[in-house]
Amino acid sequence: MDKIIELIKQDQVRLSALDCVSKLNLPQCYIAAGFVRNLVWDSLHNFDPLTPLNDVDVIYYEQHELDSNTYLNYEAKLKECMPEVNWQVRNQASMHERNGDLPYLSTLDAMSFWVEKETAVAVRKVGLDQYECISSFGFESLFDYCITYNPKRSRETFENRVNSKGWLVRWSSLRVAL
């Protein structure tokens, strides 16, 4: 989605984070969730400065990764690159076990199980000043001020996340779309 990439190119912190992550050379590797979602919502609400990143969710898909703690090494490498960031790295090939789902087939498939559809958006650096943005549910609702329930998850989990994260307070024009 070109608009998301335009927004990211205006944010030096996000560009630096994408650069650090690209150096890991992980398969199907993206930065996702609030990294993209919050930036779009900030833009829609004309926020300046932008909402601070409380964490940066790095997702990748490596089916043959033997050590379940490998993500800790990746987090340490990213911390060396940008120590001010709270990095959260997860291999989506194993996340189905934690979530009680059948195995995921890819990073994009794993995102299709996330609680809100607008969170299932991710971006990665693919070349010099080139970025790729993906979404399990498309981009329309993200730009349409929505927080949309994903029926693959419980309604209670969705409602708890909306309330605990304070999204409707922070971005007052958002609305819940069930």
Image (cartoon, rainbow, N blue to C red):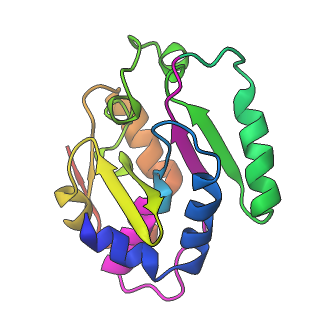
Q: Which quadrant would the N terminus be assigned to in this image?
A: bottom left
Q: Determine if the magenta segment contains residue 122.
A: no
The image shows residue 162 at horizontal and vertical percentages of 42, 49
Horizontal arrangement in the rendering, residue 60 relative to residue 152 (left or right): right
The residue sitting at 80% across, 62% down in the picture is 83
Q: Does any portion of residue 55 appear in the rendered image?
A: no
Instruction: Check the image and report above or below for 1 versus 109.
Output: below
The residue sitting at 59% across, 63% down in the picture is 19
Count of all numbered marks drawn on residues in the image: 0
Instruction: Check the image and report above or below for 134 versus 110.
Output: below
Horizontal arrangement in the rendering, residue 111 relative to residue 95 (left or right): left
The image shows residue 166 at horizontal and vertical percentages of 48, 59
The image shows residue 132 at horizontal and vertical percentages of 35, 57
Image quarter for residue 4? bottom left
The image shows residue 112 at horizontal and vertical percentages of 31, 33
Image quarter for residue 175? bottom left
The residue sitting at 78% across, 48% down in the picture is 77
Q: Which quadrant would the C terminus be assigned to in this image?
A: top left
Name the foreground residue: 5 vs 43: 5
Name the foreground residue: 57 vs 142: 57
Q: Determine if the magenta segment contains residue 40.
A: yes
Instruction: Check the image and report above or below for 137 versus 176.
Output: above
The residue sitting at 39% across, 20% down in the picture is 104
Name the foreground residue: 147 vs 86: 86
Q: Does any portion of residue 133 appear in the rendered image?
A: yes
Horizontal arrangement in the rendering, residue 132 relative to residue 85 (left or right): left
Magenta stretch in the rendered image: 36-63
